[in-house]
Image (cartoon, grey):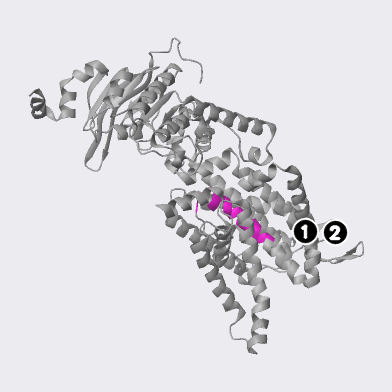
Amino acid sequence: MSAPLRDAAAGEPLLVADRISKSFGGVQALADVSFTIRRGEIYGLIGPNGAGKTSLFNVLTGIYAPEAGTFTFDGHALAGLKPNDVAERGIARTFQNIRLFANLSALENVMIGRHVRTRANVFGAIFRNASTRAEERAIETRARELLEYVGMSPQANTLAKHLAYGDQRRLEIARALATDPRLLALDEPAAGMNATETAALKGLLESIRRDGVTILLIEHDMKLVMSVCDRVLVLDYGRKIAEGPATTVQKDEKVIAAYLGGEVTLSLRRR
Amino acid sequence: MRSYFELRRHPGLEWAGLALVAVALIALPWVLADIGTAWVRITNLAILYCFLALGLNIVVGFAGLLDLGYIAFYGVGAYVYALLASPQFGLHLPFWVILPLGAGLACIFGVLLGAPTLKLRGDYLAIVTLGFGEIIRIFLNNLSSPFNLTNGPQGITLIDPFRIDGFSFATTQRVLGQTLSSPIKYYYFLLAVLLVVIVINLRLQNSRIGRAWEAIREDEIAARAMGINTRNMKLLAYAMGASFGGVAGGMFSAMQGFISPESFVLVESIMVLSMVVLGGMGNVFGVVVGALLLSYVPEVLRYTVGPVQQAVLGRTLIDPEVFRMLLFGLALVLMMLFRPAGILPSALRKRELQARTRE
């Protein structure tokens, strides 16, 4: 991995979201959501189903345009950028419903992730000059390193669709890391994982952070969120209802209400 | 691909095989010429179809964009050659100037026609490209007035053959006691270009660009999220495919000496697409096999269906042309049933189709 980011920049804002709004028809998916992600932290994004978490991801990564509000990434506005431009700026993502290149091998999937950081054009591809050959070797070496990093070296030649569910999730992370992101946005990486896999994922997230990549994490596995995230943002019906360190947010009444359905459920719980 | 890598473990065997193929390809026109010069011409046309099928394979096989108007680029290349090397405008530029020009113009047309279709997929893309293909043909058909550019439906005649200094591809010469006829000269030229085209295809497929196309075909949204500029990559696929078509068109003009819009009709597009599909989308060698099969089999039938019926029945019951289409349809149906991924499926396509049947 790249050199650890343990410099003066750690703790500075990396991504600033300012009053982001987005609606689909009559449904307000996101309403005035503002937050700041600092360099080097693992920032959790939680909320009940339909709270707008994935919509926020899609707006952030350029799949949807926000109706109002701006994202500032590393000091530059992301307004109007296409998904590929966003990736180029250094935001990589995974998908809630895994979107690997199913009929390609694990290695090829990660190699495609290197596309945005490599340069070979048609002429290079046709004439295979020395620099293109060197670049191809570098792409493959890097892809193998990343597979090793997420613990998938033995499956390098397995087709993505033949991988176990947990492995597919890890492969998506490796593919995203191949784009050399500064912010890694993970959409429910632990979904469908068993306890052992989740524990391994936690280790992986921590080492990614240690290696200098900031992480934005959507996750339903509260144990994971609470143990790995530095700060957490809670969305409900497209609105920010709480933000702060995991331990604080956990005790926030609005959060408990959103998750457990308000006082009635709470009273049931007390019994 | 796997069989190829197995071969690689025995380099001696590989080289012996290649040498054998090379000798066979060099000897082929002389053997065919003994049967009849027509067969050499048919072989040359078959190689032209290989160019077309390989070009279309970039668009359809690699990038997964269904293009039903591909023959238009063949037409553009053919007309560029015809206009710059015929009495139409009194221009007689050498072929090595015109072929790159034709490729370039076809390439531009590929981008122009590709640009409006970037957001379309599947059926919609097919319909729009089909329309574009027809637009070009109709233009060629009607650009005879007010300014006579293409000579309309009459087409352009007396197109120059390839010529290098005094060496003309159109005449028959005696070389080393052998008759070197015009089709045989073209054959060697076409064969050389075919090798180049195949190498370009293989290298494109196995490159950063080829992987980006694969990614787009597999999942466009994921491809974009990985930083692939899908717009540019799709346009590149159209441009590359079209330029192959343009080169093929120029050669077609020179070989035939006459072209008219009738050579660039929709059926031709469908034919080339069938070659790609029959051979195996995405597999370069499969596509070549598909193109050769669909070029040769109809010709063989043309020469056999009539005489066989005469001999057996004493009269021609079914017109060879009708029989040809009948068999062609049957072959496609059988193929879809028994080899849905083509004769030599690309490893990739094969996996996709197996998955689909398993689901």
The magenta segment is: B47-65
State the image coordinates of residue B182 (x, y, percent, origin top left): 80, 65
The answer to which of B120 and B51 lies nearer the viewer is B51
Q: In the displayed orientation, state which residue is furthest to the right.
A: B177
On the picture, is B13 further left or further right than A183?
right
Q: Secondary structure at mark 2?
A: strand
In this view of the protein, can residue B149 be seen by the observer? no
State the image coordinates of residue B130 (x, y, percent, origin top left): 50, 61
Please name which of the two marks, 1 or 2, marks the residue nearer to the observer.
1
Task: Answer above or below: position of B18 versus B251.
Answer: above
Q: Which residue is mark 1?
A: B24
Identified at 73% across, 47% down, the residue is B14
Q: Which residue is mark 2?
A: B167
Which image quarter: residue A53?
top left
Q: Is residue B183 magenta?
A: no
Badge number at residue B292: none
Q: Chain of mark 1?
A: B
Give the residue type at disc 2. Answer: Phe
Q: Main secondary structure of the magenta part?
A: helix
The answer to which of A105 and B177 lies nearer the viewer is A105
Give the residue type at disc 1. Answer: Ala
